[in-house]
Amino acid sequence: MSQQKRALITGVTGQDGAYLAQLLLDKGYEVFGLVRRSSTAENALIRLKWLGIAADVNLIDGNLTDLSSLIRTISDIKPDEVYNLAAQSFVKTSWDQPILTAQVTGVGALNVLEAIRIAKPDVRFYQASTSEMFGKIQQPEQNELTPFYPRSPYAVAKLYAHWMTTNYRESFGMYACSGILFNHESPLRGIEFVTRKVTDAVARIKLGQQNELRLGNIDAKRDWGHARDYVKAMWLMLQQDEAEEFVIATGRTTTVRDMCHIAFEHVGLKADDHIVIDEKFFRPAEVEILLGDPAKAKEKLGWEAETSLEDMICEMVDADLERASYGH
């Protein structure tokens, strides 16, 4: 009988971490999650509880900025796979806290790589890269060979982590790869992200709890998929013979405006009656359009997005209607 695989997930209490933990548990893994100690710790497990897996994940105190805690964690649990999903991941905040973003999102990934190199170099490592690294796009469709042009401190920090992952693979022979994931959402998405901000507002407007939805640039285009689909790609990347980068996307781009229309129409309302454009929500440097080319992932991983944007947005609105009706 083969030994049970062990996986360590940083950022396990986030959207992707929760869905990935669920996937790995379903596959028979023993799952460990690195959790940053904070004053709001009681709220940290809300996503794991939503999926009904909070009791099944082994939580470990640690921090990406503390190399010693990472070395101890790797040494103690001896994981087969490490998924680095933790980051300061809200783009707007990265302009207000650029140094923190660099330390956590950029150097934090390097700390994980270094801990693995020191404590268990045969670990298979996944780095959560992002389509934001493409920024001011250099090609109409972005693939693994498209040049990067980051447009936020967050994207710059992610690009550092991305290239460090490649460097450790090439320098030390480690199995280290990055998934360049385009926007992926779900009912577990944080309220600060635009899709969830929209679906939460739609639910509250439908229930008479608020009247308007204030947004910034609603003509920005994004390639949106479902996080539940995208974590499958993360796992598949670590099951290959050789580590390499993959773009994970739907291959379809949609404006924020059209996404809003889908959400409002789901509850029988008109978006134009409730959306207010507010300049304070515009970014200092905007990424106008992102459109991923997932051909390599389909060919080599056998992966493709399964959930349509329409189905995903409706699922999110329904979840927010449930939350709002219970006063959450």
Image (cartoon, helix red, strand yellow):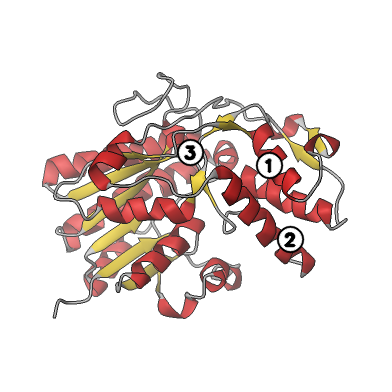
Q: Disc 3 to disc 2, how far (Cα)?
A: 31 Å
Residue flagged by tag 3: what amino acid is it?
Tyr
Quadrant of residue 125 in the image? bottom left
Mark found first going from the N terminus, 3 or 2: 3
Crowdedness near tag 1: few (<14), some (14–19) or many (≥20) residues, C-alpha within 10 Å = many
Q: Residue at x 44, y 34 (%)?
A: 251
Q: Secondary structure at mark 2?
A: helix
Label annotation for residue 154: 3
Q: Residue at x 49, y 67 (%)?
A: 37
Is 151 on the left-hand or right-hand side of 85?
right
Residue flagged by tag 1: what amino acid is it?
Ile
Q: Disc 1 to disc 3, how far (Cα)?
A: 29 Å
Q: Quadrant of the C terminus?
A: bottom right
Is 175 on the left-hand or right-hand side of 270?
left
Instruction: Examine the rendered structure and indicate whether residue 287 appears above or below residue 83.
Output: above
Q: Secondary structure at mark 1?
A: helix
Tag 2 and tag 1, C-beta contact below 8 Å = no
Crowdedness near tag 2: few (<14), some (14–19) or many (≥20) residues, C-alpha within 10 Å = many
Label annotation for residue 262: 1
Q: Secondary structure at mark 3?
A: helix
Instruction: Examine the rendered structure and indicate whether residue 18 appears above or below residue 140.
Output: below
Label annotation for residue 202: none
Total numbered badges shown on the rendered structure: 3
Residue flagged by tag 2: what amino acid is it?
Leu
Q: Residue at x 76, y 55 (%)?
A: 203
Q: Is residue 62 visible?
A: no
Horizontal and vertical percent for residue 152?
51, 32
Instruction: Examine the rendered structure and indicate whether residue 250 appears above or below residue 149.
Output: below
Observer-nearest of 259 and 193: 259
Q: Disc 2 to disc 1, how far (Cα)?
A: 15 Å
